[in-house]
Image (spheres, rainbow, N blue to C red):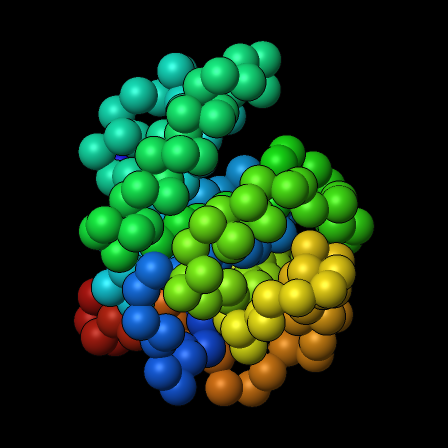
């Protein structure tokens, strides 16, 4: 369902593959500006070969996401959030699971970034061998029938003073960078209608 939705919704999804993927566990920290962010991160982590978990605010509405690492993180129930954080830490330590963490905690409009929550700092301290990767997700809509998405991976963030703010700035800096020329297709989506039905590609007798 996730793969079908992304193929149908986008012309293409692009990324720049990292020169080397850090050994798991990894904490991937993207911005949260788009409805499809979780779906795109699913494609990213599966392509990188990272067995990951993801905290979902509305998990009870979509419990089947547990099959691909979704875990409950309801706004109104702190006990369940705490239980999810503890279970995540156990999985990262015992099974080298990685974590997709939307540190802004809520979906909101671009371009601003909300403050990063302390859950990121809690997990980073509890799993000191985890690499922390800032991720920028950008959407562009204009010259094509469907939007295109671009995912960019930053350099690992070192722990220490102002850890949350430095991670947030790293994501913000990635979002501001000019679009690189070396994008590769992460997910091939649906071409524009003129690309799909260009009659000039047909033999003349069939036009």
Q: Position of residue 56 (x, y in %)?
A: 45, 30
State the residue at coordinates (55%, 18%): 78
State the residue at coordinates (45%, 43%): 38
Q: In the displayed image of the protein, which residue is found farthest to the right?
A: 112
Residue 63 or residue 158, whichever sits in front: 158
State the residue at coordinates (50%, 64%): 132
Q: Is residue 181 above or below residue 171?
A: below
**Does residue 201 appear to the left or right of 16 in the view shown?**
left
Q: Position of residue 155 (x, y in %)?
A: 55, 77
Q: Position of residue 2 (x, y in %)?
A: 31, 41
Q: Position of residue 202 (x, y in %)?
A: 25, 71
Quadrant of the image occupied by residue 105: top right
**Does residue 165 appear to the left or right of 59 in the view shown?**
right
Which quarter shows the N terminus?
top left
Quadrant of the image occupied by residue 25: bottom left
Number of numbered markers:
0
Residue 35 or residue 68, whichever sits in front: 68
Q: Is residue 149 above or below residue 154?
A: above
Residue 49 makes an appearance in the image: yes
Residue 110 or residue 19, whichever sits in front: 19
Which quarter shows the C terminus?
bottom left
Quadrant of the image occupied by residue 26: bottom left
Residue 142 makes an appearance in the image: no
State the residue at coordinates (69%, 37%): 108
**Does residue 46 appear to the left or right of 148 in the view shown?**
left
Q: Is residue 77 above or below residue 107?
A: above
């Amino acid at each position: 369902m996730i793969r079908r939705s992304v193929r149908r919704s986008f012309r293409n999804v692009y990324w720049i593959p990292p020169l080397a993927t850090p050994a798991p566990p990894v904490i991937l920290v993207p911005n949260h500006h788009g409805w499809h962010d979780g779906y795109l991160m699913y494609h990213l982590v599966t392509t990188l070969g990272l067995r990951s978990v993801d905290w979902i605010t509305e998990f009870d509405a979509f419990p089947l996401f547990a099959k691909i690492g979704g875990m409950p993180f309801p706004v109104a129930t702190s006990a369940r959030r705490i239980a999810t954080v503890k279970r995540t830490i156990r999985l990262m330590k015992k099974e080298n699971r990685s974590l997709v963490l939307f540190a802004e905690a809520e979906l909101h409009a671009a371009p601003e970034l909300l403050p990063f929550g302390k859950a990121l700092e809690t997990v980073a301290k509890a799993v000191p061998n985890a690499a922390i990767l800032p991720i920028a997700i950008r959407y562009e809509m204009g010259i094509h029938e469907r939007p295109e998405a671009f995912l960019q991976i930053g350099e690992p963030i070192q722990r220490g003073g102002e850890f949350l703010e430095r991670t947030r700035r790293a994501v913000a800096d990635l979002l501001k960078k000019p679009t690189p020329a070396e994008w590769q297709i992460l997910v091939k989506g649906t071409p524009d209608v003129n690309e799909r039905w260009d009659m000039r590609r047909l033999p003349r007798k069939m036009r």
